């Protein structure tokens, strides 16, 4: 097989002079500074985007405040209708969006189509449905009546205001959709700050949002480096930040938000997620599980597993079977439809993974499979299996965010639980067993925001998702996001 041909509309989009999306259209930045977007599969420059300035931040915040006034007064049914239309437009432009995403992120085209477009549209429709279902409650106050007067009360859920949505590079479209959908369905306006590595697809989506009928200023996109995100969060004209990214940046974002004006913050951060195989698990099922949990999108998924705990009697055959499966993965260009394993998303990330491999060797962990990066211009990294030497090994404790599965043996169930919980993170975990009653007894003992049984990594818009411990604050999806994007107003009446 060979690379698919890029659509003429994709080539035309990439060649454009990309500016900022403010007030329902493109606006030139106040400076000539640009950032170069590189294709991680080839190392080639594919586009230039603006690096927004403080003056651009002022313009975007001003526009988002005007957009908020209009959008928050738009009826819930009309809001839902715009979001449903946007979902239809995502699907109509499926191939175009998927190709842009693959060119900027190196994600294999099948994942761009299935997740960045199809799943994103599915999530968007789920959120759109909430616009007409957000309610307060009626309350009978508890006060005693002093002179025959009576009381009644109710609560209103009101949109929080201007949201800043800060997005990482791993799922630049889907995560941006989670943020804009949460904000827009609740009546907030939003300014998206995409990752400097993957700023392109969301610009095209902003155009589609305007086509779907979104009023000017309800969605603005400011491209640029982290300093643009910082300026937005600390601006007095923004009310909430919804951040997805690494723990150190998340802590800085949370501190900046609190220090600004108690700006509300939802933080979806990194993970060092555990898989626990109970001894009854079938080997073939375990291997399928390991591929799903650790190697989908080269492990560049916050919920992906990086720590694999297997019973001492089974760890060798498990690593052996996984190694055989990894050897057969077809590594190649992400634009080739037969490729199963593409590059990682950028050079910095590839170098970071190289440093992890060097650390593993220095600490005498055993590299069972892989453990090298490619020398060429593409950011390729071998899918890797490591057997840790001790529970203190770096690879068993620090998030690599790459295609790296680190194994460690256990002897007893208590030991398994202690190992799974021995981490500063708490995003996700999975248990693999045919013994459902045992699984249900273990689930409450596991310190993670999501625990899967016989599956890993699958996110559903109806099921809340977010981290405990250092993996974050707040929940996306389900009805849980509504608390984070609205303020509760209590109204009390005496009669
Ligand atoms: P990152 O923290 O480096 O950057 C994330 C975003 O923050 C980027 O847009 C960046 O420009 C911006 N940023 C950087 N400094 C900033 C600052 N001081 N103020 C405001 N914004 C700033 O993360 P990354 O490398 O892009 O993404 C990988 C990380 O994201 C991993 O740790 C991964 O686990 C995490 N992640 C978490 C989830 C989740 O839902 N929990 C989902 C995807 C990725």
Image (cartoon, grey):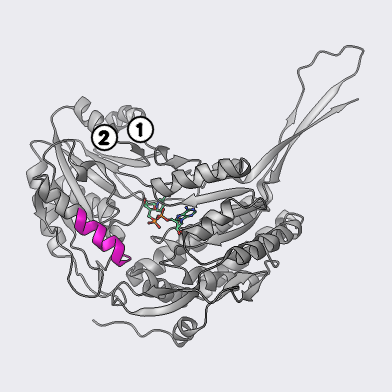
Residue labelled with disc 1: 447
Element at badge 1?
A: loop
Asked if residue 468 lies in the magenta stretch, the reply is no
Q: Is mark 2 within 8 Å of ligand 1?
A: no
Quadrant assignment for the N terminus: bottom left
Mark 1 neighbour class, 10 Å CA radius: few under 14, some 14 to 19, many 20 or more: many
Task: Tell me: 419 left or right of 13.
Answer: left
Task: Tell me: 199 left or right of 326.
Answer: right
Q: Name the mark on residue 176.
A: none
Q: Which residues are magenta?
A: 344-355
Quadrant assignment for the C terminus: top right
The alpha-carbon separation of the residues under discs 2 and 1 comes to: 8 Å
Asked if residue 350 lies in the magenta stretch, the reply is yes
Task: Tell me: 373 left or right of 476.
Answer: left
Q: Are marks 2 and 1 in contact (CB under 8 Å)?
A: yes
**Earlier-in-chain disc, 2 versus 1:** 2
Q: Give the quarter of the image for residue 292.
A: bottom left
In the displayed structure, would residue 93 be above or below residue 340?
below
């Amino acid at each position: 097989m060979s690379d698919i041909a890029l659509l003429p509309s994709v080539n035309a989009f990439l060649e454009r002079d990309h500016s900022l999306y403010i007030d329902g259209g493109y606006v030139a930045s106040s400076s000539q500074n640009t950032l170069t977007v590189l294709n991680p599969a080839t190392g080639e420059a594919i586009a230039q985007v603006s690096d927004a300035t403080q003056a651009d931040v002022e313009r975007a915040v001003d526009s988002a405040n005007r957009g908020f006034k209009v959008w928050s007064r738009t009826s819930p049914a009309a809001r839902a209708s715009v979001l449903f239309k946007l979902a239809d437009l995502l699907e109509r432009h499926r191939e175009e969006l998927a190709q842009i995403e693959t060119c900027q992120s190196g994600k294999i085209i099948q994942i761009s189509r299935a997740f960045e477009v199809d799943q994103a549209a599915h999530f968007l429709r789920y959120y759109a449905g909430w616009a007409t279902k957000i309610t307060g409650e009626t309350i009978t106050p508890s006060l005693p009546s002093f002179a025959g007067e009576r009381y009644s009360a109710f609560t209103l859920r009101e949109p929080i205001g201007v949201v800043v949505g800060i997005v990482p590079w791993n799922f630049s479209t889907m995560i941006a959709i989670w943020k804009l959908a949460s904000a827009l369905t609740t009546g907030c306006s939003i300014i998206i700050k995409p990752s400097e590595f993957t700023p392109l697809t969301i610009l095209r989506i902003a155009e589609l949002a305007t086509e779907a009928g979104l009023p000017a200023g309800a969605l603005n996109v400011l491209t640029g480096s982290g300093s643009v995100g910082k300026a937005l969060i600390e601006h007095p004209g923004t009310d909430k930040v919804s951040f997805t990214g690494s723990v150190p940046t998340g802590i800085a974002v949370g501190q900046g938000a609190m220090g600004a004006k108690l700006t509300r913050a939802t933080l979806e951060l990194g993970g060092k997620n555990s898989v626990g195989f109970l001894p009854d698990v079938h080997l073939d099922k375990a291997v399928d599980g390991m591929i799903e949990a650790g190697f989908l999108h080269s492990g560049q998924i916050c919920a992906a597993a990086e720590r694999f705990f297997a019973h001492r009697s089974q760890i060798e055959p498990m690593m052996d079977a996984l190694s055989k499966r990894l050897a057969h993965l077809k590594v190649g260009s992400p634009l080739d439809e037969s490729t199963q394993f593409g590059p990682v998303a950028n050079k910095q990330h590839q170098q970071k993974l190289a440093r992890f491999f060097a650390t593993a060797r220095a600490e005498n962990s055993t590299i069972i499979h892989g453990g090298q990066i490619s020398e060429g211009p593409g950011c390729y990294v071998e899918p890797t299996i490591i057997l840790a030497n001790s529970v203190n090994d770096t690879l068993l404790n620090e998030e690599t965010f790459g295609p790296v599965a680190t194994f460690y043996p256990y002897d007893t169930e208590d030991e398994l639980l202690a190992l799974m919980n021995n981490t500063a993170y708490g995003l996700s975990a999975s248990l693999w067993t045919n013994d459902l009653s045992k699984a249900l007894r273990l689930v409450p003992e596991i310190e993670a925001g999501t625990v899967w049984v016989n599956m890993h990594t699958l996110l559903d818009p109806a099921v809340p998702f977010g981290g405990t411990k250092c993996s974050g604050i707040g929940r996306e999806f389900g009805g849980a996001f509504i608390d984070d994007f609205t303020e509760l107003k209590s109204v009390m009446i005496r009669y």
